[in-house]
Image (tube, grey):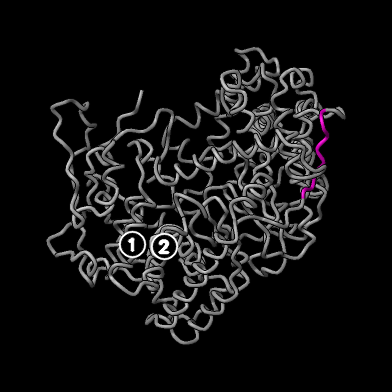
């Protein structure tokens, strides 16, 4: 059965509107033979809908799909199909000893060996679970949480990570990050009941697996979720997370002891095997609330949640008899090979990414993308030089940052595997090998505390359908997966590719100069004062214009975009399209870029998912990443002869230019 979509996607009624509408949207009537034929919107009415009419007018999501379905999900599907074949080839080959291909083969085959998995059970986890259950004091539980991370790779309430120091980006520092929310966002708890229900059911299932009686498990799960609700409410709202200064809270020993007054922080760090002189607390309010619960009174709830974190981390690897209760991968019995491949793609994402990248990133592809990056950098440099809101000193600093930017393309060819996989023929079992992988990666990160920052470190896998800019090191990463169809193909020519992959490249590059990124220097040190006060004031005026521009953008003539929540991403979008259009020399070349932009963000989405996106995503919906952006580009009016009477029209004085 296929899901019907909201009018935004079925009838292409998502036209730009800057006026309010008091009528609530209605769900569409079922399609019948008498249903009027959908008409393709004019370019001036809805450019996004015009270019993507054939795709959007189908008005149906494939069975089983959730979230946005379109170009990005098609890319992910194509990647998964390729990776599936890649795993098959590894499994059928005789790979070199110690190679990534051998690791992939061994883990795949061990996952499929149901008898061996059932025989091994979850014995490897029992020492940790027993240690957690035996805790009687918060300090004992902190020791158990440290063991969970360093020996099993499981994060819980105390979530530590080593990252570059914002005060001096040449050195690493320890961060206390958000606690392990088991994949849930604050909005799922505070604005819906979904988070509480899903988490409660999961905790209950984990406790039942550990032979807690169902009635008791249900009651304990309720109490644990009630505690989590309080922590969620104390945590940053998504708008607050976008204020980067909120996260730079440096704590020395005495200050940290006061914040975490209910635990012994010296013992905590010794348990984690580190001795930091200072620590950055990512969310102080959240840490305070966690500390409030770190008492004997809440030991049962605390222990149950940490136990559930262990279950969450390893649920996909539990023996088959537990898979129907807590596994996140799916029905093993229905399709064992598919389940096994999903598991391998998750536990060995980085390793698979390297093998995938070696095949995808041919010389032709790399040469094409490297030229594209160079052209986009040149265009960005030219925009900075001619930017009227910047003085000469600020321009010089911006250009220095651009010139010192590290670009990571394709895959991590310098991968180092920090663990050893024990083959089944030597007595190895899948769950124990998973523990070896996860614990080694956890200890590897903590060990970086004593090392200098490496700005060329990969922070994502080459098969992750995403791209990332890191302001703490002035580096952006374009993984191999988006250097392929449907995001890129050298056969398409330069300008369509600029509208597709080029938009992504320019977007990530532009994050270096967005509302957060501009505050960091060429190596990633936080130093907003290096930009003079006058230029900062002009930039804040621009930020307010961008914020208001998107606040007034409506979907379905009802749903507003949150201009504060999406500010940095919207700036990066606007700057990116300015940048790639700067490479074009004719209307036809601009037209190809615009069409590529529209095709890239084509997607179908259910109303409930759209609303959640508007509430919890720092990115604007795909339609806005097309229509709201191109409406601010003068070239759009020249190429398509947009008139004042067109809905897409924005007066010249209201068009937002980042540069």
The residue indicated by pointer 2 is: 493
- Viewer-closest of 505 and 450: 505
Q: Which residues are magenta?
A: 417-424
Q: Quadrant of the N terminus?
A: top left
Q: Which marked residue is nearer to the observer: mark 2 or mark 1?
A: 2
Relative to 262, does residue 374 appear above or below in the rendering?
A: below
Position of 258 with respect to 639 (left or right) is right
- Give the residue number, with chain letter if any, for mark 1: 592
Q: Visible in this render: residue 658?
A: yes
Distance from disc 2 to disc 1, alpha carbons, whole Å, reads 9 Å
Give the class, few, some or many, for how many residues have Cα within 10 Å of label 2's Cα (few <14, many ≥20): few
Question: Of residues 304 and 54, which is closer to you in this image?
Answer: 54
**Residue 179 screen position, x and y as percent:** 62, 43
Q: In which quadrant of the rendered view does residue 528 lie?
A: bottom right
Residue 48: percent from left, percent from top = 28, 52
Other residues around mark 1 within 10 Å, as few (<14) / some (14–19) / many (≥20) = many
Quadrant housing residue 321: top right
Residue at 17%, 43% (x, y): give it.
39
Instruction: Look at the numbered disc 2 and give the secondary structure of its residue.
Output: loop
Residue 542 visible in this rendered orientation of the protein: no
Percent position of residue 545, x then y: 32, 67
Left or right, 495 with respect to 48, comes to: right
């Amino acid at each position: 059965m296929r899901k019907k979509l909201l009018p935004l996607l079925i009838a292409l009624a998502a036209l730009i509107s800057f006026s309010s509408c008091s009528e609530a949207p209605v769900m569409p009537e079922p399609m019948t033979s008498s249903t009027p034929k959908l008409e393709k919107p004019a370019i001036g009415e809805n450019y996004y809908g015009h270019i993507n009419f054939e795709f959007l007018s189908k008005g149906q999501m494939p069975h089983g799909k959730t979230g946005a379905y379109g170009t990005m999900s098609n890319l992910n599907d194509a990647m998964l199909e390729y990776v599936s074949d890649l795993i098959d080839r590894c499994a059928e080959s005789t790979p070199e000893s110690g190679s990534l291909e051998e690791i992939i083969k061994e883990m795949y085959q061990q996952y499929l060996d149901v008898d061996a998995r059932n025989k091994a059970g979850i014995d490897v986890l029992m020492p940790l679970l027993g240690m957690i259950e035996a805790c009687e004091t918060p300090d004992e539980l902190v020791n158990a949480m440290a063991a969970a991370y360093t020996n099993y790779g499981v994060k819980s309430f105390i979530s530590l990570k080593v990252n570059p120091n914002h005060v001096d980006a040449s050195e690493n520092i320890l961060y206390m990050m958000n606690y392990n929310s088991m994949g849930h966002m604050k909005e799922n708890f505070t604005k819906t009941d979904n988070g509480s229900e899903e988490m409660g059911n999961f905790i209950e299932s984990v406790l039942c697996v550990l032979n807690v009686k169902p009635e008791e498990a249900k009651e304990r799960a309720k109490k644990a979720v009630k505690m989590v609700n309080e922590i969620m409410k104390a945590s940053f709202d998504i708008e607050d997370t976008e204020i980067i200064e909120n996260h730079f809270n440096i704590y020395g020993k005495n200050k940290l002891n006061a914040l975490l007054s209910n635990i012994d922080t010296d013992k905590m760090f010794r348990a984690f095997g580190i001795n930091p002189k200072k620590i950055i607390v990512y969310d102080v309010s959240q840490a305070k609330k966690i500390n409030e619960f770190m008492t004997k009174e809440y030991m049962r709830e605390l222990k149950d949640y940490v136990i559930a974190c262990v279950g969450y981390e390893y649920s996909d690897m539990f023996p088959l008899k537990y898979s129907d209760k807590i596994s996140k991968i799916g029905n093993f019995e229905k399709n064992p090979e598919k389940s096994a491949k999903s598991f391998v793609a998750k536990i060995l994402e980085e390793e698979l990414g390297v093998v995938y990248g070696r095949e995808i990133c041919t010389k032709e592809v790399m040469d094409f993308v490297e030229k594209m990056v160079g052209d986009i950098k040149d265009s960005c440099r030219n925009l900075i030089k001619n930017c009227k809101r910047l003085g000469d000193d600020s321009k010089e600093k911006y250009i220095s940052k651009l010139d010192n930017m590290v670009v990571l393309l394709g895959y991590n060819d310098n991968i180092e595997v920090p663990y050893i996989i024990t083959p089944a023929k030597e007595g190895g079992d899948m769950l124990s090998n998973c523990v070896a992988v996860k614990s080694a990666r956890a200890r590897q990160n903590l060990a970086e505390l004593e090392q200098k920052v490496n700005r060329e470190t990969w922070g994502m896998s080459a098969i992750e359908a995403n791209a990332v800019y890191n302001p703490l090191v002035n580096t952006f990463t374009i993984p191999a997966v988006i250097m392929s169809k449907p995001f890129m193909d050298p056969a398409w020519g330069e300008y369509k590719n600029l509208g597709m992959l080029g938009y992504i490249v320019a977007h990530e590059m532009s994050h270096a100069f967005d509302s957060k990124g501009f505050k960091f220097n060429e190596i990633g040190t936080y130093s907003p004062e290096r930009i003079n006060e006058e230029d900062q004031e002009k930039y804040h005026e621009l930020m307010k214009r961008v914020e208001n521009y998107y606040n007034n953008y409506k979907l379905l003539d009802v749903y507003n975009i949150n201009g504060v929540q999406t500010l940095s991403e919207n700036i990066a979008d606007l700057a990116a399209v300015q940048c790639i259009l700067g490479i074009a020399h004719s209307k036809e070349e601009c037209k190809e870029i615009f069409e590529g932009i529209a095709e890239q963000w084509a997607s179908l989405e259910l109303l409930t998912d759209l609303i959640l996106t508007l509430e919890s995503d720092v990115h604007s919906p795909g339609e806005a990443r097309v229509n709201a952006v191109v409406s601010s580009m003068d070239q759009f009016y020249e190429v398509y002869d947009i008139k004042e009477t067109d809905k897409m029209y924005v007066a010249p004085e209201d068009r937002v230019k980042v540069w």
